[in-house]
Image: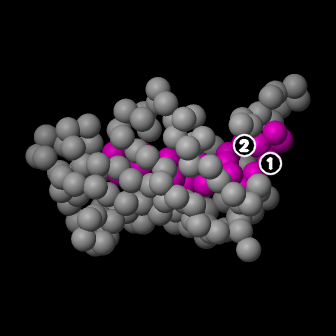
Amino acid sequence: MTIWYDDAIDVDVINERSRGSAVEHLGIVITAATDDSLQGTMRVDERTVQPAGVLHGGASVLFAETLASWAAMYTLDQSKQYAVGMEINANHVRPGLPGLLRGEATPVNLGRTTQIWDIRITNEAGKLVCVSRCTMAVLDLPAGARGFVS
């Protein structure tokens, strides 16, 4: 059984909607959705490193919140509700070195007004680089709003 409102996610639509945002500027790409997770990639390169040449913690947090935010949105009827980040934390387990990172967001709790997502970011060797938890607020669209539907 899937957690998604419409049973399926078109990652091409998500990536198109991300154009012109911080998501695109950092090279974050949503790559797949399983029945209960959303997956993506981000490259550790000149866009995402700190001056020491390793992954900037802020870039990994942006990657984590991107995965959680898109995942939360697709559990909702987007013509009636939307999700926004309330809180995020991250533990940086090892330095992110140049290369491709993979991230996966899975739900901890999908409540009526809040959702909690666990996000794990790994390097090309499959080793944990960052673990994050993101709490999302689920809000009703104001009267007359169009929503964020495809």
Q: Where residue 143 sits in the image (x, y, percent)?
A: 88, 29
In the image, 31: left or right of 2? Answer: left
Which residue is at a point 11% across and 46% down the rendered structure image?
Answer: 52
Q: Give the residue at x 42% y 35%.
A: 24
Depicted 136 relative to depicted 3: above or below: above
Using the image as rendered, state which of residue 58 and residue 24 is in the foreground: 24
Q: Residues within 10 Å of mark 2 (few under 14, many from 20)?
A: many
The residue located at (52%, 58%) in the rendering is 32
What segment carries the magenta color? 59-83
Specify the amino acid type for callout 2: Tyr
Amino acid on which disc 1 is placed: Asp
Q: Quadrant of residue 127?
A: bottom left
**Gap between marks 2 and 1 measured at Cα:** 8 Å
Q: Does residue 85 appear anywhere in the picture?
A: no
Q: Position of residue 59 (x, y in %)?
A: 34, 45
Residue holding disc 2: 82
Q: Quadrant of the N terminus?
A: bottom right
Q: Which residue is mark 1?
A: 77
Q: In the rendered view, would you say 141 is above or below 104?
A: above
Q: Is residue 112 part of the magenta span, yes or no?
A: no
